[in-house]
Image: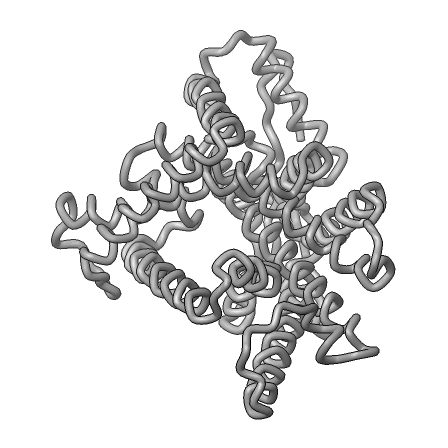
Amino acid sequence: MKEKDNGDVTMEVFHANSTEKEGLDTPEVTVVNDLDEKVRMKPTIGLLNSITIIIGSMIGSGIFISPSGILANMNSFGASILIWIACGIYSLLGAYCYAELGTMLHSSGGDYAYVLEAFGPFVGFLRLWVEVIVARPVAIAIISMTFAQYILQPIYPDCEQPKEAKACLATMCVLLLSFINGMSVRMSTLVQDVFTLVKMAALLLIIVTGIVQIGRGRLRMNLFTFASRVYGPVWWIMPIFVACSTFGGVNGTIMTTSRIFFVASRENQMPRVCSFLQMDLLTPIPAVIITCIISIVYLLTGSINSLITYLGFVQWLAIGLCVFIVIVFRFTRPDAERPVRAPIAFAVIYVLGTIFLVIFAFVGSPTESGYGVAIIVVGIPFFFLTKYFDRLPKNVRTSMNNFTVSWQKLLKLVPGN
């Protein structure tokens, strides 16, 4: 890496030829002079890994802790089952719409890539801002706090858990998984595979137990602590299963969030260093570190309930915008190839549903929702900062370049592709 006197930065660019020996990543890196050559992340995520990442990210703690709350509020077994069925159908409508977008647009970046393609860089940046500054880090904070709560439950079964212990465990969870994701893609996918299997085993255990209880004629609604009543002295296995489920959820969210930072940086909508890779490990360490820091800030400054409120309003607003793209493209790109074509009614129903949820969230919790809106508005000046970076004062650009070079020297980073 070389720094010119005028503050501009030029870098030697590295090329990585990765090989595999005994199941380990052993990248061989050599310096080249061709500036078109860049380091690439090795495609180590296969079909099975992709499936476990999706399952692991979708199945967190909610499937284990939500049923009791729904049943208690509805006070009717049949009504609670109908709510679960309705929510499942609603989710399938949205998934079908996302399948159309995913097979129609092949750019990396998920929602950010779709919004960028449909509405341009300004709206795309705001969607990115919501995703990486609010939605993903808040989700990581919520899931890690749930992990801490359930891992402590066998230790504090009948008394309140110390807040300091929960915060410490949640922070350790985020730090550990960030370290794993920064060190090896193969290791992070292995963690995802293992803990996805654990959570599937937990769900299977609950389902089989329920079928057995029905077979014994226990059909009445029973509001009791499931694990302690059914499993007796080994009741603690259930909170451990839930903790394992949330651990995998945190890992999957960190993995995918760091990739969004990586893609956004290549579009010049995030700091350039976010698209750099560690030259020996070939992992996006800067993106992982930034994700980790933002998540821990949320974790240490908010309760689970307030974080869920922030996330609910902002996330539904962003998801509704993405599904709306299906409707937009039917008119602006009617002849585009669509390997998966969702009925337009699915998108309309889903968008109307998200509008209702956004309004409901705002009316129910105006203060927290207002914070969510404020965070979105704060993103506007940052968009213009990235768009007109070349017009900033020379000393500002020099400081940014020096910051990038410092990260490169500290972590042995090179531009990625």
Q: Quadrant of residue 204?
A: bottom right
Q: Give the answer, above or below, for where 50 lies relative to 356.
A: below
Q: How is the image coloured?
A: one colour
Give the x, y percent position of residue 266.
47, 38
Q: Most extreme residue toward the bottom, as rendered? A: 215
| Quadrant of the snapshot with the N terminus | top right
Along the horizontal axis of the image, is 192 left or right of 365?
A: right
Q: Residue 386: tell me if it is visible.
A: no
Residue drawn at point x = 74 percent, y = 59 percent: 150
Give the x, y percent position of residue 183.
72, 53
Q: Quadrant of residue 248?
A: bottom right
Residue drawn at point x = 74 percent, y = 39 percent: 411
Count of numbered marks: 0
Residue drawn at point x = 33 percent, y = 61 percent: 99
Q: Quadrant of residue 25?
A: bottom right
Q: Most extreme residue toward the right, as rendered? A: 155
Q: Give the answer, above or below, for where 381 lies relative to 24.
A: above
Residue drawn at point x = 60 percent, y = 53 percent: 255
Give the x, y percent position of residue 405.
67, 28
Along the horizontal axis of the image, is 92 left or right of 244?
A: left
Q: Nearer the viewer, residue 301 or 398?
A: 301
Q: Residue 400: tell me if it is visible.
A: yes
Q: Nearer the viewer, residue 1 or 387?
A: 387
Give the x, y percent position of residue 302.
67, 35
